[in-house]
Amino acid sequence: MEKRFWVYVLASAHYGTLYVGMSSDLPKRIWEHKEGVAEGFTKKYDVHNLVYFEEHGNAEAAITRERQIKEWKREWKINLIERSNPHWDDLYENICK
């Protein structure tokens, strides 16, 4: 089975604080953010709603994309989220099925 990699965006609330990350195990990583297992920014600022994610075939592509999105203006990140998730729903349950 081929390994998959994910770039994701978390939000504290609708139009709230944003966090961009990358993982090879998206459900586990988001669970860690939600449960406060992941120390740092997301725990400090209560950023745990999965509002966007995209799949990549290899780690290099995912890392490149993560860095690209992190450099974007906030408005561009909001537009990225709203194209696929206009209501800023927490998508965590969708990835756990």
Image (cartoon, helix red, strand yellow):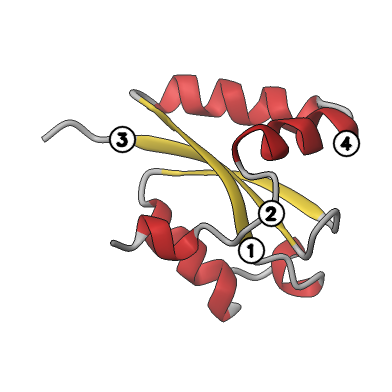
The percent coordinates of residue 1 (x first, y second) are 10, 35
| Secondary structure of the residue carrying numbered label 3 | loop
Label whose residue precedes the other's in the sequence (4 or 1)? 1
Q: Residue at x 88, y 36 (%)?
A: 74
User: Which label sits on residue 4?
Assistant: 3
Q: Residues within 10 Å of mark 4 (few under 14, many from 20)?
A: some
Q: Residue at x 78, y 51 (%)?
A: 18
Q: Nearer the viewer, mark 3 or mark 1?
A: 1
Q: CA distance from mark 2 to mark 3?
A: 24 Å
Q: CA distance from mark 1 to mark 2?
A: 9 Å
Label whose residue precedes the other's in the sequence (3 or 4)? 3
Q: Nearer the viewer, mark 1 or mark 2?
A: 2
Q: Quadrant of residue 6?
A: top left
Dot 3 amino acid type? Arg
Q: Nearer the viewer, mark 3 or mark 4?
A: 4
Q: CA distance from mark 4 to mark 1?
A: 17 Å
Cβ atoms at labels 4 and 1 below 8 Å apart: no
Q: Residues within 10 Å of mark 1 (few under 14, many from 20)?
A: many
Cβ atoms at labels 1 and 2 below 8 Å apart: yes
Cβ atoms at labels 4 and 2 below 8 Å apart: no
Label whose residue precedes the other's in the sequence (4 or 2)? 4
Dot 2 amino acid type? Trp
Q: Quadrant of residue 39?
A: bottom right
25 left or right of 47? left
Q: Residue at x 47, y 19 (%)?
A: 61
| In the image, residue 45 above or below residue 54 | below
| Residue named by callout 1 | 49
91 left or right of 14? left
| Residue named by callout 2 | 88
| Secondary structure of the residue carrying numbered label 2 | loop
Q: Residues within 10 Å of mark 2 (few under 14, many from 20)?
A: some
